[in-house]
Amino acid sequence: MTIQTVTDAIRYVGVDDNTLALFENQYPVQPMGVSYNSYVILDEKIAVMDSVDARAAEEWLSNVARVLEGRSPDYLVVTHMEPDHSGSLMRLAQKYPEMKIVGNAKTFTMIKQFFGTGAFSEDRMLEVGERDTLSLGLHRLRFLLAPMVHWPEVMAAYEEEEKILFSADAFGRFGSLERTARAPWAPQARRYYYNIVGKYGAQVQALLKKISALEIKTICPLHGPMLTEDLGEYLRLYDLWSQWKPEKPEGILIAHASIYGNTAYASEALKRKLEGKGAQVAMCDLTATDLSYAVTSAFYCGKLVLACSTYDGGLFPPMKTLDPKKAENKAEKAAVNGSAEAATVSAPSVQIDLSKVKIEPLFADDVDFETFSKSDFRVVKIEACEAVPKSKKLLKFTLNDGTDRKRTILSGIHEYYEPEELVGKTCVAITNLPPRKMMGIDSEGMLISAVYEYDGREGLNLLMLDDSIPAGAKLY
């Protein structure tokens, strides 16, 4: 890909990959290809924004060198550690040994996991946190943590001088820049979002809230084109998608899987009847359509018809691709294999050494049933979560407890969770404890967590339930 000028001081040095058949080895990207985006900010100090997939390392290193014109970069900013963006990280770090690596705490945990604990000396690792800044001269980067959009370590970087948001995988799109320069952004951005980021809608909402106060002139994602016009529309779509709201509420998708053609014939007949009544209808043949397109169409339309034959007493296999249990099983397998994307999978999916676990002894004294029944345990939905200023441990939760009012609870679990990754979760709280003032804020109850000792250190898991359980449901 040709080097592009973003602004007078910022260059695009990314690389197109037009040979990749399956993105992440599962999403077809031919004939459109895909881009691995990287940028260089030229100032008194020079920052390279992310690296690229190892497949594209040589071209990327050449692009960076051409832009640097003999200078050495001062920083490599790592906003995302997925291998298609970190695969060439060590190549650049070895070429420029004085260059510092900029990331958050989780970034460096993953760097050590990917490249070894001795990959970088401590003085080469510059750790940043929420709203920390990095001055390059006239340009200054402000960092916004975005965990689980869509990996745990993700962060965005806002360049304050030229109002540019380096958004990691958010606002990304399938398609190489060379082959899709004139293609509309939304169709492949929609498919990218729903299949790769879509599970983390609550976390995307948290990021959108953070950037809503910023003046943004350009969005520079890690895949697809730089966005400079119609930013309001792109933000609107991301807000809609991350709330799982259909773009065509009255639109109908008929997804069918037919063995001998009869179910397909019936689906066509239904389509004609619905269109005769003025409905907007799309068809999807699951025996011939890749699942990523089917999923995208299912979220795009407000109504869904599934039609298939039975097969050996169950669903015809192509229809099973839309079975949500398959996605859950896939996530569990990823957790066992150590995938960073599976960070929100429940603890039983992750293998731990039980010999290193110690738990508190059971209470010797019995509690009569009447005393126990006075405790009101309720299902709550986390609508908002934020760190409490001047406290290293406390998180402030705004909870839907099934009533008309919002409940506030403070919990000292910041050591174990970042607030953004908890938004949208379904948990358990005891709701009839008297209010307790903490850091000047009334805490109206207690969230239930499992606490234990693991390998000499305290471990904690916030108790999380199936999201299908409604807020306010009582636990007995």
Image: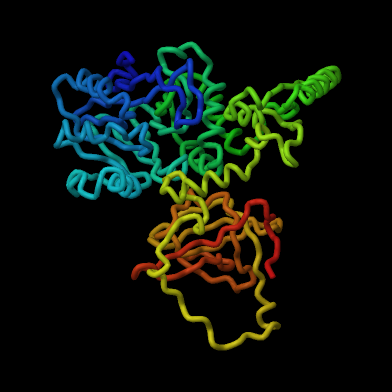
The one nearer the camera, 346 or 286, is 286
Q: Where's residue 141, x and y in %?
A: 32, 35
Question: In the image, 251: left or right of 137?
Answer: right
Question: In the image, 163: left or right of 264?
Answer: left
Residue located at (53% from left, 23% from top): 188
Question: In the image, 309: left or right of 136?
Answer: right
The one nearer the camera, 439 or 71, is 71
Looking at the image, residue 163 lies above or below residue 346: above
Query: Image quadrant for the N terminus?
Result: top left
The one nearer the camera, 236 or 61, is 61
Query: Image quadrant for the C terminus?
Result: bottom right
Q: Where's residue 366, x and y in %?
A: 60, 87
Residue located at (68% from left, 24% from top): 284
Question: In the image, 115: left or right of 302?
Answer: left
Looking at the image, residue 199 lies above or below residue 159: below
Looking at the image, residue 167 lies above or below residue 273: below
